[in-house]
Image (cartoon, grey):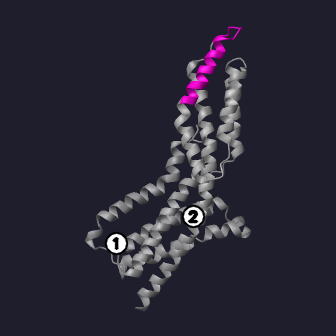
Amino acid sequence: MSQQRRLTPFQFIRDNLLLFVTAVVLLYGWTQRGDNYLTAEEGTGYILGIVGGSMMLLILFYPLSKRVALVTRIIPSRYWFGFHMFLGTVGPALILFHANFQMGSTNSTVALFCMLLSAASGIIGRYFYTSIHHGLYGKRITLMEIKQKIENDHSELLKLYAKDDKLNKKLINMEETALRPFPGLMTSLLHVIYLAVNAPRLRRKILSLLKKSYAEDIDHRAPPDNKAVSQVVKHFTLSLREVAAFRLYERLFSLWHLLHLPLFIMMIATAVIHIFAVHLY
């Protein structure tokens, strides 16, 4: 991502601290699983199962908050989202400790795997989400916002050297290529890969045109700083890739939504069956 969208160290730590801490705790639990210090049937292990399962149910408050205006009036949507992320991270971790990182009966194993699938889906969705938002808790990025960066870099390149028709046409051609819409998901992915692979060649082409433009400049102005020029060119080609990647991530995020909901429903259904099976039999 470009420098304008790059997270500060504080933002990165804030957005990922819970994930890192949970991963460390889970790693510790995994190494201690053979000690049998927790059992799912009684004591602390049983309580962890109740708390973890309740947290997974409370996840439903976030989609509810997006559909009931009264809920967001009381608590803003971004806080509900943070609550959703917390529950979706800590809840599965508690369930894993409840199971002592081991498989039990058939119904409990099915419920566990459904939960892990849903949790893994949530992590993937988190990546897609942050790719089309300013960080985990920032506003959604718009396509016009990225296009504006391309236009600014375009103007800056023409400003550094006298307006050159050949250079201008090349820049416009690059922009049209990056902005070209593709109907299929695979073609969009290949387009992003193409732009990434060809980025060094595009940068060399632009720099070559800039040098030629300066050599033909009849006013013989002093050349701009090479490092500054290279930085603008790099930013321009990166913005071109961002446009294509943004469209791809939008599609992937929409498809992820269609998959994540059935996984979540399947997790809830298998968890309910598991609870009834445990307490009835």
Identify the main secondary structure in magenta: helix
The residue depicted at 51 percent of the width and 43 percent of the height is 9
Which residue in the structure is indicated by mark 2?
A: 83
For residue 161, above or below residue 198: above
Asked whether residue 211 is drawn in magenta, I would say yes
Q: Which residues are magenta?
A: 201-222
Locate residue 171, reporting x and y percent.
67, 29
Frontmost residue, 13 versus 234: 234
Locate residue 32, reporting x and y percent.
29, 66
For residue 172, above or below residue 67: above
> How far apart are the alpha carbons under marks 1 and 2?
25 Å
* Badge 1 amino acid: Asn
Locate residue 184, reporting x and y percent.
62, 53
Instruction: Classify mark 1: residues with Cα within 10 Å, few (<14), some (14-19) or many (20+).
Output: many
The residue depicted at 34 percent of the width and 72 percent of the height is 100
- Farthest residue to the bottom: give it: 280
Going from the N terminus, do you reach mark 1 or mark 2 first? 2
Which residue in the structure is indicated by mark 1?
A: 100
Tell me the number on the disc at residue 220: none
